[in-house]
Image (cartoon, helix red, strand yellow):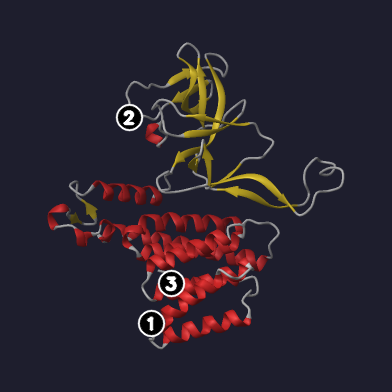
Amino acid sequence: MIAFEQVHPWLNKFSPTHLRPCSISLISHMKSALDAGHTTEAAGLLQQLDDYACKLRDDAEVVEVLLDCAETADRLGNLDEAGAILMDATSRSWSDLHRRAVIQWLVGIVQWRSMPARQQAVITWRNSITDFERLAKKPSIPRQQHTWYENICCLLERNLVEALEEVGRYVDLIESAEKTEDDFTIHSGQVSTNILSSTSTITHTFDALLHGESTFAGTVDILQLFNVSEEIPAGDFGPSGSDPFITDMVEIDHLSINGRPYSIHSSRGNRIINVPFDQKLSVVKVTGDSMNQENITEQDFVLLRKVDVPDNGDIVLAEIVGVDTRATLKRYFKEKDIIMLKPNSNNPVHKPFVFNKINEGFYIRGVVVAILKPF
């Protein structure tokens, strides 16, 4: 498994440090105390540095100080403190894709060491790999940097597989120390049917991740809504009508509806949901249980994009003439001259509908871009 101290230097792999001499001095003092075994002194300096970071104005320097604090907390075995510090660092570097990817992997390392959080660790690591993959695909980066990102993606994928392979070999996920032998048994890496329901959820999620299946449980995706530009060209966005100075995207991972927070989840398994601002979008409250096996329930909303013809496998909001004039969620499949709208529900009342052509017997009201689930 990749260790914290191996990943930490990646933060400034392609940029100089932002630490000033006074910050470097305090960090060096803290690490020297830790290396010498003076844990009480190291813990005191960690708290001093954490407080000091709150007074700094440069977020880039704050993040570097926080990562050194998190590494010290991790070495001291204070996993909750390390996790909290890293989450602060993540929020301060969210717009910097490289730093975000590195810090997310560090968060996963700390979560993995905390047995009850191992399910979340795999999700966090997957998010980190997704960000590194995005960096590797950037056309403007130097070749050496591109190669490094590709190699890191391979390394992290191997680490993730190794972590997943451990699932069948440990019982720490279910806090075995708090349970008696009668609560569960494990044979040849398989969990028996009398194990607690929380473990079944964890095992299912790991299996889904291992086999590439999508799951909404515990994962949060990112919705890209607006372009970020270096400048606005005089007069217009150029002859093509497009902005030639786009540098990034505005990204959100949660939103609010009627004052209640909702997390964002992709309908197609892609962590990054890119929605051009010029597309027609709408949000609709979910009714019924025709897609509850996809973890889409009546407490959710769906973000819809208006399209004339969906792609195979899209979840669509369809109005079926004479059956459901309020519109219903179904999977859209087309093969030759046959169109099928297929539910995915544990309620047997829901059946597939078969048609020959769009707008003959049913109408597509939109394609589901994302599912919005309440916290």
Which mark is nearer the camera, 2 or 1? 1
Tell whether label 1 touches label 3 (CB within 8 Å): no
Question: Which residue is depicted at the point 48% across and 65% down?
Answer: 86
Instruction: Give the SS element for disc 2.
Output: loop
| Residue 250 horizontal/vertical position (percent) | 64, 49
* Mark 2: amino acid: Asn
Quick check: 97 left or right of 228?
Answer: left
User: Which one is earlier in the sequence, the residue at label 3 or at label 1?
Assistant: 3
Q: Residue at x 17, y 54 (%)?
A: 185
Query: How many angstroms separate mark 2 from mark 3 (CA)?
Result: 43 Å
Q: Who comes first in sequence, dot 2 or dot 1?
A: 1
Q: Is residue 304 above or below residue 18?
A: above
Q: Is residue 106 visible?
A: no
Q: Report helix, strand or loop for mark 3.
A: loop
- The residue under label 3 is which amino acid type? Ala
Q: Which mark is residue 3?
A: 3
Indicate the position of residue 30 as horizontal and vertical percent values. 48, 82
List the single residue furthest toward the left.
182
- The answer to which of 136 and 249 lies nearer the viewer is 249
Give the image quarter of residue 373. top left
The quadrant of the image that shows the N terminus is bottom left
Callout 2: 10 Å neighbours few (<14), some, many (20+)? few
Q: Establish if 45 lies above or below 260.
A: below
- Residue 356 — which label? none
Q: Which residue is mark 2?
A: 346
Q: Which residue is mark 1?
A: 40
Mark 1 residue crowding within 10 angstroms, few (<14) / some (14–19) / many (20+): few
Residue drawn at (16%, 53%), measured in percent from left and top? 183
Quadrant of the image occupied by residue 43: bottom left
Estimate how packed mark 3 is, as few (under 14), some (14 to 19) or many (20 or more) residues with alpha carbons within 10 Å: few
